[in-house]
Image (cartoon, coloured by chain):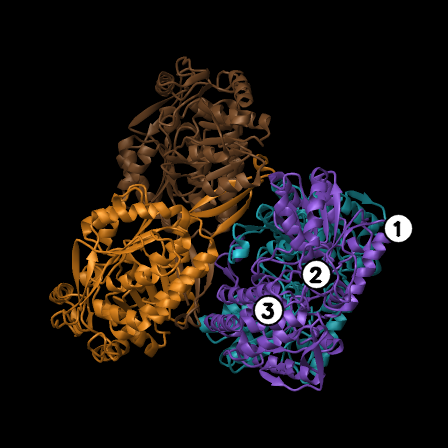
Chain colours: A cyan, B purple, C orange, D brown
Amino acid sequence: METYKIYLAGNFTDSTTYLDVLNPFDNKRIARAGQADEKQLELAIQLALSVQGEVAQLPSWKKYKILMEIAEKMQDSHRHLSELLALEAGKPWRYAKGEIDRAIQTFVVAAEEAKRHPGELLSLDWTPAGEGKQGIVKYFPVGLVAGIAPFNFPMNLAVHKLAPAIASGCPIILKPSTSTPLSTLALAKIIDETDLPKGAVSIMPMDRKTGNLLVTDDRIKLLSFTGSPAVGWKMKSQAGRKKVLLELGGNAGVIVTNSADLETAVKKCVAGAFAYSGQVCIHSQRIYVENGVFDQFATRFVELAKNLKRGAPENPDTEISAMIDEANAMRVEDWVNEAVEEGAKLLCGGQRDGSYYPPTVLTETKPAMKVCALEIFGPVVTLEPVDSFEQAVAEINNSDYGLQAAVFTNSIQQMDYAHRHLEVGGVIINDITTFRVDHMPYGGVKNSGLGREGVKYSMFEMMEPRLLVK
Amino acid sequence: METYKIYLAGNFTDSTTYLDVLNPFDNKRIARAGQADEKQLELAIQLALSVQGEVAQLPSWKKYKILMEIAEKMQDSHRHLSELLALEAGKPWRYAKGEIDRAIQTFVVAAEEAKRHPGELLSLDWTPAGEGKQGIVKYFPVGLVAGIAPFNFPMNLAVHKLAPAIASGCPIILKPSTSTPLSTLALAKIIDETDLPKGAVSIMPMDRKTGNLLVTDDRIKLLSFTGSPAVGWKMKSQAGRKKVLLELGGNAGVIVTNSADLETAVKKCVAGAFAYSGQVCIHSQRIYVENGVFDQFATRFVELAKNLKRGAPENPDTEISAMIDEANAMRVEDWVNEAVEEGAKLLCGGQRDGSYYPPTVLTETKPAMKVCALEIFGPVVTLEPVDSFEQAVAEINNSDYGLQAAVFTNSIQQMDYAHRHLEVGGVIINDITTFRVDHMPYGGVKNSGLGREGVKYSMFEMMEPRLLVK
Amino acid sequence: METYKIYLAGNFTDSTTYLDVLNPFDNKRIARAGQADEKQLELAIQLALSVQGEVAQLPSWKKYKILMEIAEKMQDSHRHLSELLALEAGKPWRYAKGEIDRAIQTFVVAAEEAKRHPGELLSLDWTPAGEGKQGIVKYFPVGLVAGIAPFNFPMNLAVHKLAPAIASGCPIILKPSTSTPLSTLALAKIIDETDLPKGAVSIMPMDRKTGNLLVTDDRIKLLSFTGSPAVGWKMKSQAGRKKVLLELGGNAGVIVTNSADLETAVKKCVAGAFAYSGQVCIHSQRIYVENGVFDQFATRFVELAKNLKRGAPENPDTEISAMIDEANAMRVEDWVNEAVEEGAKLLCGGQRDGSYYPPTVLTETKPAMKVCALEIFGPVVTLEPVDSFEQAVAEINNSDYGLQAAVFTNSIQQMDYAHRHLEVGGVIINDITTFRVDHMPYGGVKNSGLGREGVKYSMFEMMEPRLLVK
Amino acid sequence: METYKIYLAGNFTDSTTYLDVLNPFDNKRIARAGQADEKQLELAIQLALSVQGEVAQLPSWKKYKILMEIAEKMQDSHRHLSELLALEAGKPWRYAKGEIDRAIQTFVVAAEEAKRHPGELLSLDWTPAGEGKQGIVKYFPVGLVAGIAPFNFPMNLAVHKLAPAIASGCPIILKPSTSTPLSTLALAKIIDETDLPKGAVSIMPMDRKTGNLLVTDDRIKLLSFTGSPAVGWKMKSQAGRKKVLLELGGNAGVIVTNSADLETAVKKCVAGAFAYSGQVCIHSQRIYVENGVFDQFATRFVELAKNLKRGAPENPDTEISAMIDEANAMRVEDWVNEAVEEGAKLLCGGQRDGSYYPPTVLTETKPAMKVCALEIFGPVVTLEPVDSFEQAVAEINNSDYGLQAAVFTNSIQQMDYAHRHLEVGGVIINDITTFRVDHMPYGGVKNSGLGREGVKYSMFEMMEPRLLVK
């Protein structure tokens, strides 16, 4: 049984308390991980501040070198990191491997963006007052960053905080999810081998009370949180003067139109709905299909949903495995049962088995049902027919969330209408809501978040403009 | 005695309560102004929301036309607007006229920027996952904006909220200062004559309690506040999910080096220190002079400070007039007296006369004194010698504020050092801290604020990016 | 009979020879215009060079003021300028008025872009060699510009040289077409009333031999030519070290697909084909219609083409008038007759009447026929059915020209395919090839030209980047 | 004796004629290199065109992978490539190694820029004509590129053509210098191992007559030439419709002011003047020193110049070696002797020894002397005192060339004056004229060239914008 120590400002340190990290599939303990206490967090903050100036002044070639070295070493440890991630998160092997690929890419993108900080040259002589003067806007690191990462993409969503912080020149303290701390603690070993000044990165699981100091401590200049809306928005109100970046959840909607390539749409929707048991912020939760193709779509969709291969996460054939824990599977079960009681019709799925919940398709739902209105974070999707494209857009907007939406269409008009009217952060044409590449701007509106991630965009948040007038 | 009605979503409406607006110079009543009550605010919000979609879809040529028409009509009413402003704010005529000029320019810049919304084209094929796809990022108006403006630049700082909101396609409700509501209510008449949809703009003085609804109401998507730090930061914690833009105060520092053109530096510093009695966010409050030229600088500075012409605001010769009210003059008096008691030396000024406070110069101060550490917002400046440029930078950074700083030097190295190390929003070389043109990014770090204004920059805050992947 | 003098570096000067300017509709003389001889051109060059430094250093607010003043005075003289243009060019009144509107807009855009010169801030520390350094790229005016404008849009295509030159800080010598010099000489009077340094602009008709000095003189740093390909490409080879910007002709193609809104497509195509008798660089010359809708399209197209109202240019109802001269009408007649002899079928038109040539529609043409392969610059269009979208794209690319192309479709795939594969400067979706707004990048590839106009893009050509490394 | 075959569209092919490649230091033959004849060039063009479409459509991740693989394999062969380069060019080992480093960096930068093609989103609704429309500008590869590279940086200046062509999606035919073809033919082997479609790159020495077909052939869309002004400008006139990018020579000037750090300035100036025997386009040829420090500067400069270590190129200690051939050394000797005869004073150097020419310093020269007015391309520098900074700027501008200039100063005013007034492509503050990093814009004005290289900037030239209006 391996023990993963916390990474405190360049030291792998013992803890006063340890977490048992379980495989969600069989609830067996995989390893132990240390937790930072308040004193250790205080030390991490102080050490981070002590190297803040040094980190801020790193030339871009050094940041590039460090970030590329991390990417290369992750590539060298690809198998090990994928395994850790599959086991701690119960994530099917194919998705675990894909997440490590993406985390590597996130570091590569950050390496490149470290050389491309924004900057602006302004003529100031628009009025006589500025005659002879010019403005130069450069972007400087904001200072100490706190990152809080969730369980569902324990590696890549953490890397979306770590890599931009390094590229921006900010020290960072990362709190991984207490369910899934192993992969980032393994990453800490890789980071530790580089020339990055010790103290620039700390990676430390901690309990909620300690973690909340990351929200309230005034020496931290930016909080980047990925997690649930309720927690996120509360943090915003407690964050004092610091900047806050929130990547929260959603109940992403999909529109399938008469002009869509139907087989493509079905296949992509099945993936969007059930990959990693729907435990994805941009999981496709609500699918609206134009009347003309609804029956055909629904039949084929249910057929494919039923055939997804259930299995252990480490099995290469597995398409769907256990949820993160039984409590979540029970919550999903309750919501589905409640919907069915209120009149929804179950097209497939619906039978929980411990922490496993099968691919489940509902129809004849109402917008106010939890399966529609809240973020289900499970392998459940609603399928509803619509009379028109505009109605489908209105249905998607009829929600408190706004992260991403997908539209299957070949119509220019519908594409433009969707871009103008869908109240979300991203509109995906002819692909699924879960589409994300790591350099694109990503984030939600309404209840789904504040600000954007995506390396360059996170970096922009992690820096302050400073105008020089001369 | 004229009565200025509130401008509620396209109607000039009667109020349940009225404010007396006084000339700070002689405390005579200039006019009465209506105040909105909670019901009226609710109506303004509802009417704003009812035209939100229409405002968001305005083509850029219409927004350009509306904004340029406002600018032209302000030019036609230049004298009238300048008078109102001079009287309500006690602002010397030369500065009042200058402010109207700048507000006109702010509208012109907004007209142009209405045609230049940001946008981005992204190749997404950095990995095979994105092959064949591209990303288009467009910026959409965030929704209803609330603006809260201060007394000291009652016109232009309000216009820095109104003009970007119109240019972005957001409806806006503006709360002017209750001391100085007349000039913006006069502007409302001009706005009302344009083709802007009624409801897109409301301009309404209101009491604090009503005004606080602008902070807490969830239908408002962005709050742009200019005012004091204490109020601003509290608003941030109460603002719920909305975005918050804070333009707060400072205690701006100046460095005068041995290589500076001394006569230029003195003259600009006198203006920066005493213009509008220092009631300016970027008022020069702390001047650090290299030892080699300190005595010469101080002698000449005091000489010019003493010779500033006191008078009524409407007199074209007046260089300094009354402060906004006697309470503020008394506060300044207290701080200066306290500093002197604690060992500071008065080089000139220091004798209050009702709401008038004279140009006052202190030396031998300590950083912890209120005249150094807090925002004095009065005609008081501290002059201190420094041994080195680096020490001067450290002194400026030794403050909770960080708005703008000025450096008088001809050294490339010092300029670059200042840009890299001064913890402020803007570093002004060879001009004074109060330098601002209306299209430059403007705003502070640390206690001085959050985000940037400056038309294009405010517009950026007032919009949300929405990615299209196709 | 009015005489228009040449505008030589701030002076309206007598000439040794004069041109008779005729109304193409009735061949009556409208006015006389001076021509510059070689000595006068030499003087214009010398005077331009003498103010080159002054023009280059103009602050942007002055350039803005000058350009906006020109726009406003053109608006005041709108009727007069439209009349001159209609008469000298034989351009129907509606189009003449529209051209003056656009020329005004071109000045407004230039005024705004004068404040927005490009500029770039570069981090140079991508390798240790650049550590501690940064780069600042500013754009400086290239020097003296020569502009040569054609007869067909005598005002706006000249303004597309004049306005960017002023906005860039370059002096310019403009040679208008000898057929249509009056409107730009009238514009010279407006320019002369502004504060632009005398010498910065000369507007002078001249004969070919004198005009050729604009191509060969080494003191001129950029030649911007709009005209025929043969002349343009020859100029490129004679231009020495100067930069050359060529806006030449084309035989623009249109694709009408099965998914198009057919009535819209027909109406827009008729306008694209016959407006100003097709004497437009981006005149729609070749229309490819998918088989499924060809007959319907052709029938309706011919119907509308036949009903266009012929008349005098100054008549507000006139839709089509005389061509610029009888020689051109005869050339068009020859090409059409030759096509018919080689097997093409005439669907309407084809009968010349003096310098009038009617709206003419051909089908069953072959790519090698002059009416297809060359630029017809007359009111003639070919209509051909195609089996597929890809075939239509291939047909358009099967040409030596590549200016603009239009595609009527509602398919995202076809739009993307067209953007990727059509070898042209601009692809217009659901509008006609003649679509142009004055701030968009405009220009051709292949035989159709070199470089782009469109204010900002012309300005980019008229400036040189200069890197500062510090 | 190794034979290097030409690389013809993916094949290493035999030639009808071969070149002997000599070590300039001892005139011993190093290797033989093939030369392409006209038929082989024709074949290379045809094969390039046959893959043009495939190359243009490569996704960015493939281009990134190919370019990074080249960079990595060059790193693996670093020693071999450095040796080849040192021997064929007679380049001292330290500089040869540095050039390979830079060529690797050029590929890395190109890999990154392959993912960052320019693109622009335009609102078109600035007038009612564009209401509801938007513009999307994408950049597409221009087509087949011809590159002609010089002897002095045989690797990196060739890579500045190859890498951007690949990153842009253009096939390229590269003609290396016939004196120094070995390093690029070795690079061809590395390129050949990647997945780049065969035909996309040809690297082939050829004689002038054959090479001239690269200039005149109309199927080639862009010519990128680095070499002498006389040849370059002639090519421009013969290039037909293709775009031409010229990187020509100069007589770069340096200003050393009273405020400069003198020891730093001297050391950098010695390097700028004599590195690789001044056979560098941006070699420091004319040094202007303010009167106050002239004597001190001159004394120290001559002292260091005399102490440069002469030796064989492959010797790690060598600082200066033979020139490229004796003809060039004799030309330099003639120019120096001529200057001395006309009154110039020799401070050191001046004695030729075969193809070796020593570090030579002249003073009391006149601007019309060849050593000042022409590009000497040898280890000769002129030192002249000036009365003022402005005079020094005027002296530098008093030349037909304008590539780069260096200014040693600590004055902000002088820096700004230099940036505004020096007629060059790049102004280097406190470093030498030879400063270049590979991602910065690089190129000259006046006789020194047309357009800019520097990966991103070359790529911009190698692409055409194509507007989509929808």
Could you tell me the amino acid type at mark 3?
Answer: Val
Could you tell me the amino acid type at mark 2?
Answer: Ser
- Name the element at disc 2: helix
Q: Which residue is mark 1?
A: A16
Of tags 1 and 2, which is closer to the observer?
Answer: 2
As displayed, is residue C322 above or below residue D72?
below
As displayed, is residue D79 above or below residue A407?
above
Horizontally, is C142 left or right of A431 in the view? left
- Badge 2, how many Cα within 10 Å: few under 14, some, many 20+? many
| Residue in the picture at 45% in, 57% down | C62
Assess whether mark 2 and mark 3 are in contact (beta carbons under 8 angstroms).
Answer: no
| Residue in the picture at 32% in, 66% down | C433
- Name the element at disc 3: helix
Q: Nearer the viewer, residue C60 or A1?
A: C60
Could you tell me the amino acid type at mark 1?
Answer: Thr
Q: Which residue is mark 3?
A: B159
- Name the element at disc 1: loop
Q: Quadrant of residue D330?
A: top left
